[in-house]
Amino acid sequence: MHLIITDARLARSRAIHLSGTRLLLAGLALSLCLMLVAATLYHWVFLKGAREGWPIVGSLVRLVVKDEFAERDRFMRANLDAMARRVGEMQARMVQLESLGERVLGLAGMAPGDIQKADARGGALVSAHNLSMEELQTTLDELERLTNQRVDLMTVLESRLFDQHIRKKMVPTHAPVTGRSAGSGFGWRLDPITGQSALHTGLDFQADTGTPILAAAGGVVVTQEYHPAYGNMIEVDHGNQLVTRYAHASRTLVKQGDIVRRGQKIAEIGTTGRSTGPHLHFEVLVQGVFQDPQKFLSAGGTTTNAQVAAAQGAAPTPGR
């Protein structure tokens, strides 16, 4: 682009050449000047007019600001309503969780008074549309507090139920021989060898040699040896001074110090030691005192022939 500037008084002219780059720079400079002028006008006219209350400018600025505030308020209100609905749903879930916790307390054998509970209870919001930001924050804080309490409660319940589960697995209620009937029960009887009255300290299970002998509960093997009377014998400690004894085995499959689980095969039936035929002599000792094994097996749902015979008044089959 060529621009020719002519001076009439001096009777001369001057030519100016503008390239594309120069035109672009000139346009940018002009745009920047216009922006600065517009910003200056806004600052000195509109803002000053709004502050000083100019009739037209002040009303126009207040209208624009009012629309902006109204739009912002509608946006915040919509978000508050959505959050309030979510808080209401969370409160309803908290009520359900509290009821569930009370039921689980019963399963764990605990009374509701065993756990310190909060006075505040969850519930649906009464008027979500009229809830302010402060009220919403207060409700959220209360929900957080209740959630922490429920977490603590569930942790205690989990510990109690796990402890009960472990204790149940450590009580000898599993039949040491499956699918086989019991012979002589616990108590006084005529000894099959001497023919004299003697205390039978356990429960006999008659079965063929080689029949699996199972651990009546989980525990640690404390004895695995040959005993003159008991023959090949295994003793399992279940904790709380509770021990089970398995005698007359033909073969033992565990050794002292082994950890056995409930129902695990630990030996095979035989007729070693003081025995008149292949069978398992099963004993339960609490603090070193012989107990009737049938009481423990009955707690696990195991009914033996000795128990049926005792109920019918028949004499049990002697084992040893």
Image (spheres, rainbow, N blue to C red):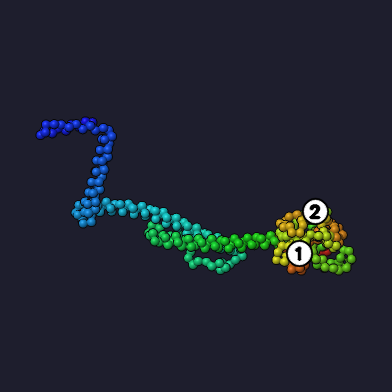
In-front residue for pair 240/33: 33
Which of the 4 image quadrants contains residue 302? bottom right
User: Horizontally, is 241 left or right of 132 in the view?
Assistant: right
Is residue 126 visible from the viewing direction of this image? no
Categorize mark 2 by other alpha carbons within 10 Å: few (<14), some (14-19), many (20+).
many
User: Horizontally, is 47 left or right of 236 in the view?
Assistant: left
Q: Secondary structure at mark 2?
A: loop
In-front residue for pair 184/275: 275
Q: Position of residue 77 (x, y in %)?
A: 37, 55
Q: Residue at x 19, y 54 (%)?
A: 55
Q: Residue at x 63, y 60 (%)?
A: 162
* Rendered-image quadrant of the N terminus: top left
User: Horizontally, is 70 left or right of 225 in the view?
Assistant: left
Q: Which mark is residue 284?
A: 1
Q: Position of residue 78 (x, y in %)?
A: 38, 53
Which amino acid type corresponds to the residue marked 1 in the rendered image? Val
Which amino acid type corresponds to the residue marked 2 in the rendered image? Thr
- Residue lying at the far right in this picture: please name it: 194
Is residue 145 visible from the viewing direction of this image? yes
Q: Which mark is residue 211?
A: 2
